[in-house]
Amino acid sequence: MRRIKTLIITAPQALRDRLRNLSDGRLLETCAGLRPDLTAVGEPEQAVKVALRMLGRRHAALRAEITDLDALITPLIATINPALLALNGVGPDSAGQLLVTAGQNTDRLRSEGAFAMLCGVAPIPASSGKTTRHRLNRGGDRQANAAIYRVVLSRMRWDQRTQAYVQRRTTEGLSKKEIIRCLKRLIARELYYVLRQPLALTHHERDETAPPTSQAEKGPFPDPGQPVGVLKASTWSTRSAASMNDVDTDERRQTIGDRGTAKPSSSPD
């Protein structure tokens, strides 16, 4: 779009007057539908029309490709973490990048601060003397940082709470760059808890684990509709011990003699 508008600025007067007041969508359609005279391509006006038509068609092709990819990615993200797409300002592209950054094992993200540092949105102190300030973090995963940045821009334009926050922080003396840094850190905190939500087992994973149908025989496996990770460590240890017949430790100790030999148990095997 910027290249198209730059060409319009340097285009001949007649073509510039025709295109300069159009909206972005209308401008793209008009540029893609231009019909330059290829036999007079040496003239400035026809040369600019050729360039504008190529850029307009390229933009339309890339936009159609993005639409097709979003249609493929959205169902996958909805299967993995549907709550992520429900957040304000988080689209399929940003959600997919955040899932890639977090990885399959989200337990490695030990805290929201660690996730913020991973995404490069953790504040870095840059205070001097009586001045207390922070600067932007240039480290971390830059693709995840760009995804959070897109969420910030979307909320700054459409979310009323974010607009009120921007107005309040502006009256406090913060610059726009500092406000965006603060918003990126706050949104990273929100995204962290959504990414750490336990995920439900898919049908394919349930077939591989093949848990018994009886509740008493299921062992450490959760119910089909129960999210993974909700079982506490105590429950897991108890069920694992029961599966290895280690819960009757006291009864076994009673059957051990003074010399360490096992006495016959009174109960049948």
Image: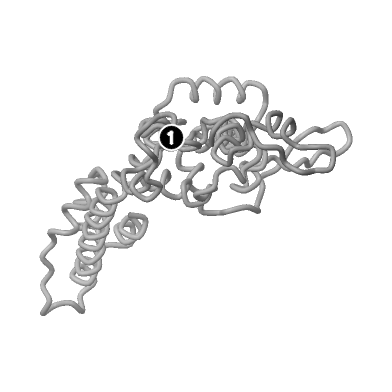
Residue 40 sits in quarter: bottom left
Q: At which x and y percent is residue 112?
A: 63, 36
In the depicted view, which residue is nearer to us: 78 or 221? Answer: 221
Residue at 22 percent of width and 72 percent of height: 47
Residue at 20 percent of width and 67 percent of height: 45
Residue at 81 percent of width and 38 percent of height: 127
Residue 116 sits in quarter: top right
In the depicted view, which residue is nearer to us: 8 or 265? Answer: 265
The amino acid sitting under disc 1 is: Glu
Mark 1 secondary-structure assignment: loop
Residue designated by label 1: 217
Residue at 66 percent of width and 42 percent of height: 114
**Do we see residue 88 in this rendering?**
no
Mark 1, other Cα within 10 Å: few <14 / some 14–19 / many ≥20: few
Q: How is the image coloured?
A: one colour
**Do we see residue 129 in this rendering?**
yes
Q: At which x and y percent is residue 211?
A: 39, 41
Q: Is residue 61 above or below residue 220?
A: below
The N terminus is located in which quarter? bottom left
